[in-house]
């Protein structure tokens, strides 16, 4: 196949312009790579758009990837190097497996990168494609939230939370969450604002805002928040949050089980045992029951 069906190097086309051309990386029409946003391909910045995809393979497994601004020509017959958007050297891999039909896949995927792989016979042509995902998401959010979607607090919260979690443009995130709060304070929007304040160094205002937010929280909100505090070894704060959950939702066995866990991890054996026994008295579901019993056995109370 290699060096025969797919010639090595650049080859003069017998049809069309009679030009020297790379391999068309498929059959018939151009194989087209569509980029919805600007990207880096093998380290070269490529604007968003549609590109004809071509490869060169040499006998020593060296090669090239080529993107042409002419994406509508038939195969390589009318390839024109003047239309190249980019060219980059690549190293073609020998693979231990056999691919019967030419196949493209995106492998080695991470947040900002994916490897585009052409697989055929026992060779693989790898091309590294990178996107600035945070920039793309934020630019998209800014545009979308200027329209109808920007009047839904949940959308504003989601955008602000993304910026917070990824530590990007927290000033914009604060604008979004303040717009959400203007529609009515909720546990979620107050929590996001509190975290933004803490990230900005205003811990006192952040802590006070969380005190305002907690009474608005659902059982699940309080449970998640309590365990987040436990993960930070903030045992008094975690106990306060999970105790509030038992006060707001006293008939939930899970709230008592979670409170028991907070007491146990803080070293308060007496209150831990009392909380776990309270949970078990409510005929809890299987996972909750198993957790309470596990801790009671560890505490020597069962």
Image: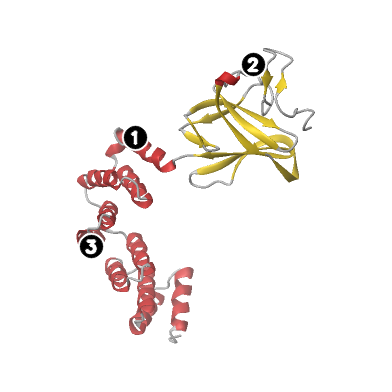
From the viewer's perspective, tell me whether residue 54 is left or right of residue 166: right
From the viewer's perspective, tell me whether residue 176 is left or right of residue 111: left
Where does the image place residue 86, in percent across and percent down from the top left? 55, 28
Q: Quadrant of residue 227?
A: bottom left
State yes or no: discs 3 and 2 in contact (Cβ < 8 Å).
Answer: no
Q: Nearer the viewer, residue 137 or 82?
A: 82
From the viewer's perspective, tell me whether residue 136 is left or right of residue 197: right
Which secondary structure lies at badge 2? loop
Residue on which disc 2 sits: 78
Which secondary structure lies at badge 1? helix
Where does the image place residue 2, in percent across and percent down from the top left? 77, 33
- In primary-sequence order, the first of circles 1 and 2 is 2
Where does the image place residue 55, in percent across and percent down from the top left? 65, 30
Name the disc covering residue 144, or none. 1
Residue at (43, 71) in percent of width and height: 284
C-alpha separation, residue under disc 1 versus residue under disc 2: 41 Å
In the displayed structure, 205 sits above or below 102; it is below
In the displayed structure, 216 sits above or below 55; it is below
Which secondary structure lies at badge 3? helix
C-alpha separation, residue under disc 1 versus residue under disc 3: 31 Å
Residue on which disc 3 sits: 207
In the displayed structure, 69 sits above or below 174; it is above
Q: Quadrant of residue 264?
A: bottom left
Q: Quadrant of residue 153?
A: top left
Residue at (60, 20) in percent of width and height: 81
Residue at (39, 40) in percent of width and height: 135
User: How many C-alpha atoms fall within 10 Å of the one at disc 1: few (<14), some, or many (≥20)?
Assistant: few
């Amino acid at each position: 196949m290699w060096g025969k069906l797919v010639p090595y190097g650049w080859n003069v086309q017998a049809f069309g312009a009679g030009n020297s051309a790379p391999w068309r990386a498929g059959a018939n029409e151009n194989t087209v790579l569509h980029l919805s946003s600007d990207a880096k391909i093998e380290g070269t910045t490529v604007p968003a758009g549609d590109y004809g995809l071509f490869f060169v393979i040499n006998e020593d497994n060296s090669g090239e990837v080529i993107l042409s601004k002419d994406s509508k020509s038939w195969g390589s017959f009318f390839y024109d190097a003047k239309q190249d958007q980019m060219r980059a050297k690549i190293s073609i891999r020998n693979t231990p497996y056999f691919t019967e039909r030419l196949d493209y896949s995106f492998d080695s995927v991470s947040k900002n990168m994916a490897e585009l792989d052409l697989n055929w016979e026992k060779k693989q042509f790898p091309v590294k494609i990178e996107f600035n995902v945070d920039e793309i998401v934020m630019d998209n959010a800014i545009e979308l939230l200027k329209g109808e979607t920007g009047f839904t607090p949940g959308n504003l919260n989601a955008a602000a939370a993304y910026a917070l979690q990824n530590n990007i443009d927290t000033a914009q995130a604060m604008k979004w969450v303040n717009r959400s709060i203007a529609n009515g304070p909720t546990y979620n929007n107050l929590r996001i604002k509190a975290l933004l304040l803490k990230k900005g160094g205003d811990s006192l205002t952040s802590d006070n805002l969380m005190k305002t937010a907690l009474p608005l929280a659902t059982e699940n909100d309080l449970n998640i928040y309590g365990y987040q505090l436990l993960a930070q070894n903030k045992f008094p704060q975690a106990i306060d949050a999970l105790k509030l959950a038992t006060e707001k939702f006293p008939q939930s066995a899970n709230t008592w089980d979670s409170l028991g866990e907070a007491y146990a991890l803080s070293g308060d054996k007496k209150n831990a045992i009392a909380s776990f026994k309270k949970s078990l008295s409510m005929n809890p579901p299987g996972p909750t029951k198993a957790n309470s019993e596990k801790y009671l056995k560890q505490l020597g109370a069962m």
